[in-house]
Amino acid sequence: MKSVNCATYEGLDAKVVNVEFTLTKGLPSFSIVGMASTAITESKERVKSALLSNEFSFPPKRITFSLAPSELSKSGSQFDLSMALLILLEDSDADLNEWFVFGELGLDGVVKENIQLYPLILSLANQSLLSKAIVPYEALDKLSKIPNVEFYGVKNLNEAVELLKNQETIEPNIIKSEIEYPSYKYQSKQYFYMKEYDEDFIDVKGQDIAKRAALIAAAGFHNIIFEGSPGCGKSMIASRLRFILPPMDESEILDVAKLQVLEGVNPEFKPRRAMQSVHHTSTSASVFGGGSHKAQIGEVGLANNGILFFDELPHFSKNVLESLREPMQDGKIRISRVNSKIVYPANFLFIGAMNPCPCGNLLDAHKECRCNELEIQRYKNRLSDPFLDRIDLNVVMQNVSTNDKASVSSKEMHKMVVETHIKMLKRGQHSFNAKMSDKEIEKFCVMSDDAKQTLEMATSRFTLSFRSIKKVQKVSRTIADLAKSEIIEKEHLLEALSYRRR
């Protein structure tokens, strides 16, 4: 019995699948066991045609493939090549146990890539389960970004057979390529960023308070809500925030590329964080992930290490808003189904945008609000206190004026964010200010005596919860970093308090 390794998806992570093969006497047949999907069972016809089209003989015996572990549901066409090679090398002395083999076969024996290939291999590499693999030659350009893996590209079935028969003398096709973007290094770790700003803050006229809050949110990864009249620039600022977020290390860039593939988008391998804009009519399953049999990733999971943007925030269903509290607090989302329980990382920066009332004119000095007090109260009550307690920055937008002028560009803001990130790394902090644990808050949020007294007074006067106190400390840390201050001073704390919900 011979075997070779392949993989399938379970949730967001790849699981190793051992493809075992036996030939026994009996009536000719071709069986695949081990909870295989339709795409895998169809491999029978692709493998048989590929062998016969390349003048290989198809054994007239009872062929059985077992995909282990048998209790794991398997899907994808990447098993074709491993099955064909096991049949062809049944009498060979070639050692296949250390190899991972991926590839879909055409009827003529050409080896093709499929959509699952990149995220599968990246997940295996991140788990240190993969060291060398045979892959479709056309996929080498994408796969070259994945570190610490030797890739052997093959164009057709004949090349794959020759590779395994002469594996002692064959060299890998590619060596990992470098990421070519501006970067800086700290303690052997490289951080990359882009200097391209497709949407620039220079286009936002006025709204200095909102832009300052956006800078703080980007520098510390703080959740933020913009409230203002229609057309005052809420969505403009939200869409520009993506371009001034902190730099990314290599693993984050690869992870974003993996999520792009899962979303059906070609991976870019750029140091630019994801931004998922969710419509208020979206269902709970589309936002958080789900499915009756297989738990699929949702918008919250796709926003990992990036931005999750909810426009028209009060119009989202109560169920969606309340369910959002867990990932905002823990940085992960759990999906439980009868057949599986999946945990997705969901470490995102939340941005919400909302009008001050149903008609939107409550804060407008030139338009009359058409809402009565009851309607306004119902509108506000759609956001619960526990949900709002997880928001770091609440910003009320100013009225638009013809005298408003541009004040700061995305390039200038991004420079300050990068400097803040470097400052954070130098003090030994590895998580963003908004994501600090209680121990990290105690260690890094050092306050002056005046700041401590001010916080005590604010806690008593505004009856701040424990969560609110910690969030004020985290925002104060970011403001102090932007001011290049080692400790949190009173003015930093007062500015942080000014962004608390009233």
Image: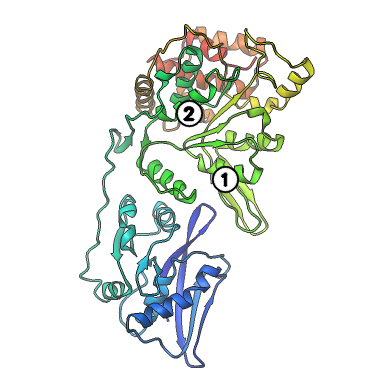
The amino acid marked with disc number 2 is Ser
Look at the picture and state if 122 lies above or below 37: above
Residue at image point 77% right, 15% down: 373
How far apart marks 1 and 2 lie (CA) works out to: 20 Å
Q: Position of residue 173 (x, y in %)?
A: 24, 60
- What residue is pinned by disc 2? 239
Which percent across, then down, holds residue 255? 42, 45
Vertically, is 114 above or below 344? Answer: below
Q: Going by the picture, which residue comes out furthest to the left?
A: 169
| Label drawn at residue 375 | none
Q: Residue furthest toward the right?
A: 374
What secondary structure is found at the residue carrying circle 2? helix
At a point 23% along the width and 71% down the height, the residue shown is 168
Q: Quadrant of the N terminus?
A: bottom left
Say if residue 406 shows up in the picture: yes
> Tag 1, which secondary structure?
loop
